[in-house]
Image: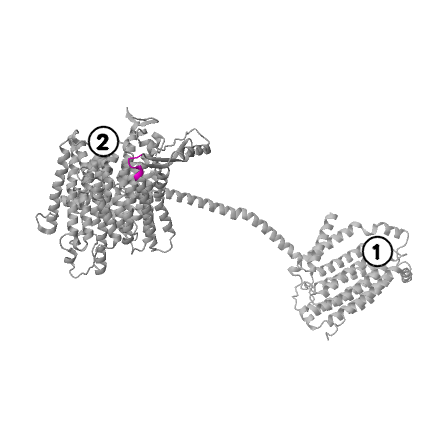
Amino acid sequence: MGRLNIQVSPTGRDLEGLIINYLKTLIPYQDLSTIYFAIAAVLLPLFACIVNCCLPGKRNKVSGWIATIAILVSCILSISIFAKIWNGHPAHIQQLWFIIGSTQLYAGILLNNLSAILLLLVSVIALPVHIYSIAYMKNDENYDRYFIYLSFFCFSMLALVVVDSMALFYAFWELVGFSSYLLIGFWFTREKAVQANKKAFLMNRIGDVGLLTAIIILFAQYHTFDITQLFGDGGLVSQSTITNGLWISPVGSLPAIWQYVACGGIFLGVAAKSAQFPLHTWLPDAMEGPTSVSALIHAATMVAAGVFLLGRVYPIFNTTELDILAVIGCFTAFMAATIALTQNDLKRILAYSTISQLGFMVMAMGVGAYASSLFHLVTHAFFKCLLFLVAGIVIHQMQHIKEDNDLDIDPQSILYMGGLRKKLPFTFIAAVIGGLALIGLPFTSGYLSKDGILIQAVDWSDNKNILFRLVPIGAIITTWLTAFYVARLIVKVFFGEFKLEQFHPHIKYHISDGGWKYRVPLMLLAVACLFPLFSLNPVLYEHAWVFTGFSSTHLQRINIYHTIVPIGVNILSLFLIYWAWAVYTERKLLIFPQTGLLFHMSYHEWYIDKVYRKVIVRAVMALSRVLSWFDRKVIDGFIHLLSTVTIAISKIAAWFDYNVIDGISRLLTFIVQITGNFVRRFQGGKIQYYLFSMLAIVLALLIYLSV
Amino acid sequence: MITLTDFLIVSAALFCIGLYMIVSKHNAIQILIGIELMLNGAILNLVAFGKFDKINNGGQIFALFAIVLAAATTAVALAIILNVYKKYRTIDPGRINNLKD
Amino acid sequence: MSLAQVLFYVMAFVVVGSALFVASTKNLVRSIFMFFITLFALAGLYVLALADFIAITQIVIYVGGILVLILFAFMLSGKETLNVLQQQKSKFISLSKLPAILLAVLFFVVMVNVITKIDAGNIGWIKQAISTNTEIKPNEEMINNIGINLMTRYLLPFEAISILLMMALVGAAHLSRKERGAV
């Protein structure tokens, strides 16, 4: 398949001729099936969404199956697309979208390695989540609405990864955020869910503004939205340089500051969507949504959109900006990992772990490990989705116990769990596989990707300032922290005694792994968490096909670090896991004090939310109060004054109208009335009056004539 | 010597008194009397001027005619007044303001 | 001042005074009888104007015919009429009569003004009549002349007036008849 990138001459004004030429070039040379498959794969979920909207009844069980079948077909199509595109020629088709002035805007579909693997990833993850959701949501009031939203999200996400224009990309970026908003607030009767989806929406707005700014600047600089032209090999971005404070590109130049603003805007977009440091606080709160949604959107796919954006626009970042990315990613990863250590809410732990892993990906982008970053994106999607589904099952069962026994407990709190491995053996196995992958122990997919990131981070800092060493060190510490908190989580949930039974000795419960709709997705995802899917060599990441698909240069294992780092990391991780197991199954090797400063800092999530609330929210509220005061007193006052003046004028006018204009007419009528009354008296039917009048007139005539 | 002017002034006075009665009275019979007074004023004029016409006697003869006509008028008027009184139970011309059905 | 003049002024005074009384009184019966006196005095004025036949006719037709007819009608109309009529307030001059009085007085003034202006004694045909001696003298007999003129020169008006008179009488009789079936 040849690369299709039709550039129609902008001088051509005859649109019809243009299209005919376009078709002529198109038909004989292109095998369009891939593109059609991609369009179908994107539109099927939308179709399912629309069909579900039209279905009668609120709890129509068909809706779940429609959505699932749509995503299944999308998945099959994605596999076929992936098979054709991966390591083959990218497919790119464009259509003239609209013309503004002399600028022609194209919309189209771009399928290269990046979009193909994301397309595959999204649909493959979405499929088990759909199946799982059918069982998970079956008793919900708004079963069909859930699938409408879910299909809509799948459509937006799939479209996001295949479009070729920054403008379209932005549109779907917004739609993804919007469907995420809908799904976080799915149980909109819960106050916390409403707060959470507002928070997520507002934080995403900040990022969206940044991204929009960046897109506008890019358009101002390059006069195109086309991703291939901008960021492709030898594209406009890679040809532009910054010299003497000017950002020079082949088609124009701007002051250099705009380049930084554009990168900052893109980073804001990434930070909001992928929950990086300043804008990460929405993600833990977003766990108010259904767990299956958390698994799909807030662990595997949507949050990966930020990293995907980084992958798309990678060439625009210069070295300094990449360093900043690395630092921020590392800091986010470290911070989120420390917070995850002390949280008691099952989903919150996983949410912070997601933030931490996303920090890893951003850091990897920053240190130049482009391929490893995307590799980690893929593996993370699988194992984090798996962990969330496991959490969903556990929470579901706890909820059942709570409802059956009428208890007042938080079903998500790990403090009430324990010993569940005997009750939920299948879930336990899946959780262990997911957990090991998250820690990054050998023989899992997580090892392959995380290993790559760590080694490349060490490599990157090798010949740099000593301060830059903090980045790989932070990453390695984060890995150990990850090992500890994952071990804590699994031990607290699955090992030891069932705590709830100790608190409430008389409860009765019958819990199980659930039917095939629960087991099959877990099984699929668990298999995807193991190494054979990605590489036949369980230790060397550079042999993984996802990695080689993105990276042409093969790393030479010359440096000693390349061996020491993974071995050291994994040995200490194993020790920490044992330690956690020892601590939390109450062998009391070491009990952590729950009063220290570090504990509080971690438990309260570094006080970031509180600081935001105290500083930003309060400032905004104060500002809005001032504005409101200004609005009420000054602007409204002015308007009130205007209205008062107007009313006064109109009253004067009314008075004038009533008394003068109407007065004249009333005077006229009064005169007429008087005259009429006067004349009427002569017409009273009294003959003597007639006679009298007649005689009077005769007399008057006589006097007049005689005088 | 009785001059013509004296007769004329007397007849004018009679005429004006009759006129006053016609205009002001609320009783049909008194109005009729007023009309008679005016007629008499006119007749007096005729008679006074008739003194100077010995050959044709126009003034006196027309005075006769006028007297006869006055008689006829009175007869008819009285008949009408009687009928009106039967119908309206009043002979005030100011109150008689309805036509016959 | 001759006797004739004295008589004229007395007669004129009686005529005007009785007529004023007729006009001013509220009592219908009194006014009718005072009208009687007016008519007699007028007949006297006719005599003084040398029209004795007219004076006789005046007395016969007016006093004997018309006045009796009025009285007759008045009596026939019943007791209620009398009561109603006599209940009217007997003010000599009431405010509502003021316009009528004003009108009458103004008319009188205008007429007197006209009469004095034209100076009736100097009108052409009257002077001619005096000079050609065709005015009636007090000692002349005019009844024959009237009869001849009536039957010759004024025959057509005479016949017309007779037919008119007959029609009036028939009409009056028709009007004053009793409705059939109304007792």
Considering depth in this image, is B62 or C98 the residue closer to the camera?
B62
Looking at the rendering, the stretch of residues picked out in magenta corresponds to: A83-88
Task: Give the left or right position of residue C146, taking residue A614 as reference.
Answer: right
Judge whether A560 appears above or below A620 on screen.
above
State which mark lies toward you, 2 or 1. Answer: 2
Across and down, in percent, residue C73 comes to: 75, 70
Across and down, in percent, residue A446 comes to: 20, 41
Report helix, strand or loop for mark 2.
Answer: loop
Tell me the residue that label 1 is attached to.
B49
Identify the image quadrant of residue A311. top left
Residue A553 circle label: 2
Do the residues at pointers 2 and 1 share their chain? Answer: no
Task: Give the left or right position of residue A503, taking residue A223 as reference.
Answer: left
What chain is tagged by disc 1?
Answer: B
Question: CA gap, disc 2 to disc 1?
Answer: 159 Å
**Residue A195 visible, this orientation:** no
Report helix, strand or loop for mark 1.
Answer: helix
